Image: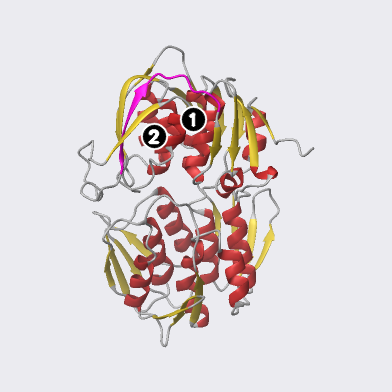
Amino acid sequence: MTGLNDVLLVHGGTPLEGEIHVRGAKNLVPKAMVAALLGSEPSRLRNVPDIRDVRVVRGLLQLHGVTVQAGDESGELVLDPSKVESANVADIDAHAGSSRIPILFCGPLLHRLGHAFIPGLGGCDIGGRPIDFHFDVLRKFGAVIEKRPEGQYLEAPQRLRGCKIELPYPSVGATEQVLLTAVLAEGVTELSNAAIEPEIEDLICVLQKMGAIITMGTNRTIHITGVDKLGGYNHRALPDRLESASWACAALATEGNVYVRGASQREMMTFLNVFRKVGGAFEVDEDGIRFWHPGGPLNAIALETDVHPGFQTDWQQPLVVALTQASGLSIVHETVYESRLGFTSALNQMGAHIQLYRECLGGTPCRFGQRNFLHSAVVSGPTKLQGADLVIPDLRGGFSYLIAALAAQGTSRVHGIDLINRGYENFMQKLEKLGAKVELPSTD
């Protein structure tokens, strides 16, 4: 059961209006913090959001002897890795339980210390994200991995060596693992079928600033020439395109008008096209993007998620809430995570009409078509949503429940809101700034 401070009362039916500020990407900032471990000098990271994943990585870095201090400006961290040391297994486990990012410490720690320990990993339950990808990659570099009751113990008996790696799927996490390991490995590493998300490119920029030699080729191929030593970096994280899109969907679903300061058009082009097709309006300026519902009915669409540059899976859940208000039948084919449509059962409880299917309702190549997963949805709208008791299943699904509760008539009790803190900085203050009627339940 969740505690009272993990429950939010949402009184729906009020359009969100106003301005909020989105900072650096959750899917880049913690990885850039890990990259600082590779350096021989301090690094400076700016535009850092105050989210739980950042706090988890900060704690893990400090356990390993990295000094992490606030910089001169708001949202700035200075990371000094000059005194890296081994950490206590129990301390690592205590810090890491709520995040999958500790797996990315492996390569840097093998380079700095010759060994690493990784406990059991947490993260959102949205489908298989096997860490086997990571361990297979590390073995190819020459790491020796021993499974122990408390987790995985890794050793590098000699300097890690560059290798050829072809990923079975363009996994963001496995691509990050290769980058963070290959930059100090001996020789050249060739990575095929790599993820090429904007956050991956930004991580490559971070590593290049440190002295790495990384070439992004065609057809998802990345070449990394190992160097003997890396320095520090001074970097401003790219904005969080996933959070920006979440607020855009909230504006659309509530018939509101939200200016997202910090949002960037370049990384959101695919989302913006779909947003416009649905009937949403937006306006880009040099500081951010304004999103609003221009009035009139929204349009049903056919949508398929895919790895970048396709429509991101993390954009899908918030948009589905808006599609419950569109006229006609919308078709959504999820090709990235097999369990990401499970959140729709709660929307149906609120009055939506969403039917899930095991078949691929779209032409994008998909890993799930013959594997009995409910990974396609037909959304029939528009439907009036009613307040309900909701239990947050995962990060993006959780924010989607918030959007649904804000768009609904009546009051919803949203349980498990602490999970949203993993990826949305100060979301409670942002909701209040936009005029949302939300409150924590009374403790009387």
Q: Quadrant of residue 274?
A: top left
Q: In screen coordinates, is 74 left or right of 416?
A: right
Q: Position of residue 100 (x, y in %)?
A: 49, 60
Residue at point 63% right, 49% down? 50
Callout 2 touching callout 1 (CB < 8 Å): yes
In the depicted view, which residue is nearer to us: 75 or 172? 172
Q: Which residue is mark 1?
A: 248
Q: Residue at x 22, y 36 (%)?
A: 362
Type of amino acid at the residue the image marks with label 1: Ala
| Residue 190 spot, x, y in % from top left | 28, 67
Tell me where the magenta segment starts and ends, as one range: 374-387
Residue sitting at the far bottom: 157
Label 2 environment density (alpha carbons within 10 Å; few <14, some 14–19, many ≥20): many
Q: Tell me, yes or no, if residue 287 can be seen here.
A: no
Q: Secondary structure at mark 1?
A: helix
- In the rendered structure, the answer to whether residue 128 lies left or right of residue 253 reads left
Residue 196 shows up from this direction: yes
Secondary structure found at label 2: helix
Q: Position of residue 162 (x, y in %)?
A: 33, 75
Q: Amino acid at mark 2?
A: Phe
Q: Which residue is disc 2 drawn over?
A: 271
Point out the image quarter for the C terminus.
top right
Instruction: Report the side of 247 relative to 361 (left or right).
Output: right
